[in-house]
Every structure is written in structure tokens, then in C-alpha cells.
Image (cartoon, rainbow, N blue to C red):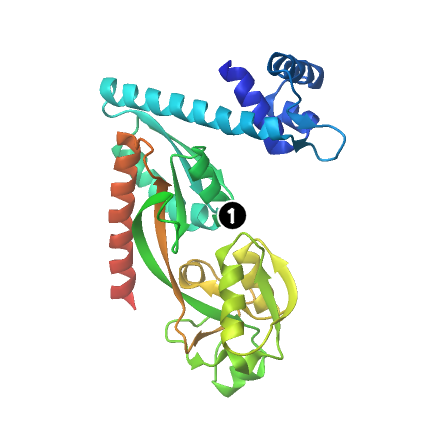
Amino acid sequence: MEYRQLRYVLKIAEEKNISLAAKKLYISQPSLSQLLLTVEKKIGAPIFDRSVTPLKLTYIGELYVNTARQILDSSEQFYQQVDDVMHLNQGHITIGCSPFRSTYLLAKFIPYFQKKYPAITLELCEDTTLRLEELALNGETDISISLLPINKKNFSYEELFKERLLLAIPPYHPICREYNLSPGIFSKPPIINLSKLKNTPFILMEQGQKLHCTLLELCRQAGFSPQIKLETQSMDAAQALAGAGIGVTLLPHTLIQSVQPKLAPCYTSLIEKPSRIAIVIWRKNRYLSRAAQKFICLLKNFCAQSTKEKESST
């Protein structure tokens, strides 16, 4: 199997469309179609079921894709080890991260890291938390920033920091008057029972984000099913929509203290005191390059120092 063919077929499997895959690969659709036909002829069986839209892998196709990922992953690990031996302070790291973490964590950390290790190149791969775990498991990222809990059979991890979860409530909601809340103030939020909001519309994060499941579970524990007004993939948008009066949403404290929308919501804590722990993960038994080890070490120190500074300022 040629590496180029493996990568091209994997891209078709990812996009489930030959035309879209060709655009992402910067080649013509006829060329990619011909390459696929060549691979299938060599195998003696189709990789994709072309009778359905989007394209679906056949059983043979699933075997091919899984094998292709293993081959490319082993190749990448080999070259990482060679690079570590020959270039101690160089390397390349592919980092899986949510857009939220990219904006409010890595945008601050990466300049600090690059100043210390200018020869190490970085590549960001942004997606939902659950998808990032898949990318790390498939070897498509060297490390990914995720959240506990994690499947410990599949991943090794290091803890980065703990963050509280707060409710963002429309400023004209009766709860705000009851507790004399002011928009944008989050330093000492009052503690409420979530059941008080059972008749209030909610803004829910999309599936694939762990906040989606967290909010639904908190509502279940409070004895009701939330009225979902809308779903969004952006926590920034959820906070702004809460401030605009659309509904209540659950947000991490790290986001709230980093940015406030023009129309800010009010904030409360919950009796359950929900929180979550941010971690950096990598697939178990996967070679972790020296560059990636340096990145993790510095990121842990950076997060620890940032937490101390925030605690001392409150």
C-alpha cells in the first residue's frame, strides 16, 4: 500500500464524498476517482458502497480504513522517534482542541511555548470534545485537550485544572430579582436549586460537547426535563443569548471570566456545585515525542500558575 493512496482513501472516508475529498486534497475529482478505482481493483473488492448518499464503507472498506490508519500511525511514530534522536529541540505537534480552549487557553499559552521552543511547529485541530477523543484514538492528533471522565483503557492523561460550572440567567428573570443579581457579576454567585428553573427555557450545547450531557443530567437530578429553546455549538453564543433573554444555559467559569457579552446575563451557582477537570490526553501505548512531552509539561505549569493568579485576585 502506498502512503499517498492510504491518505487519499481516508480523506474520502472522512468526507463521505469524492468531490469534497478532492477539494480538500487539492486534486481533481477524476484523478481521485481513478485512484480509488485502482486501489479497489488491486484489492479485488469495492471500498465504498456507491449506491447510497453519502458514501458508505463496505465491510472490506472498513478493514482497509482501519489498516490504513494503523500503517500511517506507525509511520508517524517512527519518524517522531527518529526526529527526537537527531533534533532534540525540534519537532511537530498536532494538538486537538475545542474552539473554546483554542481561544481562551492556547491563544495565551502558545506564544509562551513558542518563545521557549521556536523550532517546534504546532498544528491545531479543532472539534467537539468527543470528536477530539476519536482523533487522539485514531492517531490523527498527538495530544488532545479534553475533560474527565475519560476511558482509561484507551488513553493516558495529565490533569490541567478544575473549573466551576455556573448558570447564566437572563437579567430580567424573576430569580435575578429574588437574589438581587446584577448582570455580569460572577465573583460570588448565590447558590440555587435548579428545580426553580423548570419552567424556564434552556439553551443547550450541541451533542458531542460534554456540557450537553452535564446539563441534561443536572436537570434529571432536579426532577424535570428542560424546555430546550435552542442548541448551539458556541459557548460564547450561548452566553450572549442568555444575556439577550433567550434562556438559561450552563457555562464554565473560565469562559465567563474571560469574556462578557454586551448584554451580560446574571450568574448563579447550583447546590450540586458542578465542576469539571480539563485534561490533556494521548492514546495509550502511542509514542509521545519529546516535543509533545515538553508541550504537556509547560502547559501544566502554565495552567497551575494561571490558577494561582486567579485565586489570589478573587
Residue tagged 1? 128
Above or below for 290 versus 226: above
Count the marks.
1
Left-right relation of 49 to 138: right
Residue at image point 41% right, 80% down: 190
Foreground residue, 44 or 219? 44
Picture coordinates of residue 123, whole percent (x, y): 43, 32
Crowdedness near tag 1: few (<14), some (14–19) or many (≥20) residues, C-alpha within 10 Å: some
Give the image quarter of residue 296.
top left
Answer yes or no: is residue 277 visible: yes
Residue at image point 64% right, 26% down: 21
Left-right relation of 83 to 33: left
Answer yes or no: is residue 183 visible: no
Foreground residue, 192 or 266? 192
Give the image quarter of residue 274.
bottom left
Q: Amino acid at mark 1?
A: Thr
Circle 1: element type:
loop
Foreground residue, 32 or 116? 32
Picture coordinates of residue 212, whole percent (x, y): 54, 60
